[in-house]
Amino acid sequence: MTVELISVGTELLLGNIVNTNAAYLSQKCAALGLSCYHQSVVGDNEERLTEAVRLALQRSDILILSGGLGPTKDDLTKEVTAKVFGKELYEDSHTKERIEEYFRRVHSDQVTPNNWKQAQVPQGAKVIDNHNGTAPGLILEENGKTVILLPGPPNEIVPMFERDVAPYLNGMQPEGIYSKMVKICSIGESKAETMIADLMDAQTNPTIAPYAKTGEVHLRVTAKAAGGEEAERLIAPVMDELFRRFGDNIYTTEEEVTLEGAIVNLLKEEKMTVTTAESCTGGLLAGRIMNVAGASDVYREGYITYSNDAKERLLGVSRDTLEEYGAVSRQTACEMAEGAARAAGADAALSVTGIAGPGGGTKDKPVGLVYVGCCVKGQTCAKEFYFTGNRDKNREFAVARALTFLREELIKIRKR
């Protein structure tokens, strides 16, 4: 089955808001086995939105629109869709009650009259309750075509899709779509794809689809099956083969587990603590770790030492080291990691020092040069990296490589 996405909102066309919904919906629809050949962004204009909806219905089985369901006059998605389908709008009492309840719970002020616009739904539409906002989702089915209307805010569309829309779409297909995610670090995309080229060439059902992430590779194994048990039977041998080939480079097979989450879990299992000492990344590394719920069990303090003085004063980096090798060096990265572990009383420490750019580089030490130090139970080593992105990308890649480095060293400790 084919699905088409239309994102509605003039603010998207102007670039005032990044269209994260399209990326999210594309990934989720692909995981459900739906083919997406067209996407578009349309402003808050009735004529152009009508044209886009009609065109999409001519070439796709399923149309998902996001945005334009709010209370203001320029929110036209529901009205346009109802008009295209020849449906009248009526006030849905259930939705009206939910809007009243939402305002009582979240807002101190009373419901303004324009909010009742969101309680208007097309005749025959299935209403999807919004547990995080006021505009409900809607599903319209007509002449073999399905249109799904979803609110624009990501904190509303994501839980609505996960809870209600994904099961609905999966149920539309003659066979269900079941998938497992394999997340890999320490191996680049090209090498990972080469390692499974024979599996991908021979695949029928299930299939393997690689996705490149910053410092990681994700492999989605997808099977079409009549039920979960059959899907598990199809997927299991493929998963076994992937573990045979990638081994410890697989850090999780859980969809929601991140690399930093896997590291926090590993530290907990080993009853170890960790700290960070950062220069060019300025706290991004600590932030990634602290994004994990329960990270406080293993991470208690960290250090941002941008200047040489801070490296000496807080971490005990030798002035001789800084003068002879410079702040961006393997030697300084090692001393930063050792000093952080010592100062925090932690079992493990990561350090990052480098030249993120756009300025500050030299012939010997160009922009993008980064050293990551790792000290685990008194054993210290460092790695040199060279990144070629802009400042933001260089810092992002440095954090990803640092996390991978820490995991590699923790795995070594576990195997001893």
Image (cartoon, rainbow, N blue to C red):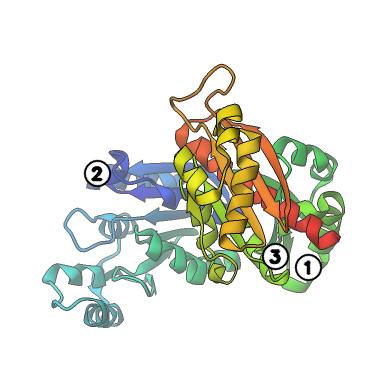
Residue 224 percent coordinates (x, y)? 72, 60
Residue 3 visible in the picture:
no
Q: Closer to the camera: disc 3 or disc 1?
A: 3
Q: Position of residue 236 (x, y in %)?
A: 82, 63
Specify the amino acid type for callout 3: Leu
259 is higher (above) or lower (below) than 41? below
Residue 373 located left or right of residue 95: right
Q: Secondary structure at mark 2?
A: helix
Which mark is first along the chain, 1 or 2?
Answer: 2
Q: Which residue is mark 2?
A: 47
Q: Are marks 2 and 1 in contact (CB under 8 Å)?
A: no
Query: 184 or 193, which is in the foreground?
Result: 184
Q: Position of residue 90 (x, y in %)?
A: 24, 73
Can I make out residue 62 in this image? yes
Given the current orientation, which residue lies at the most extreme top position?
363
As displayed, is residue 129 above or below residue 326? below
Q: Which mark is residue 302?
A: none
Q: Quadrant of residue 191?
A: top right
Disc on the earlier residue, 3 or 2: 2
The amino acid type of the residue labelled 1 equals: Glu
Q: Residues within 10 Å of mark 2 (few under 14, many from 20)?
A: few
In the image, what residue type sits under mark 2? Answer: Glu
Residue drawn at (37%, 49%), measured in percent from left and top? Answer: 7
Q: Is residue 325 above or below residue 281?
A: above
Q: Quadrant of the C terminus?
A: bottom right
Q: Judge by depth and name the residue closer to the eye, 356 or 101.
A: 356
Is there a contact, CB below 8 Å, between mark 3 and mark 1? no
Q: Which residue is mark 1?
A: 232
Residue assigned mark 3 = 266
Residue at 51% from the left image edge and 67% from the top image edge: 162
Q: CA distance from mark 3 to mark 2?
A: 55 Å
What residue is shown at x 60% (from left), y 51% (from top)?
339
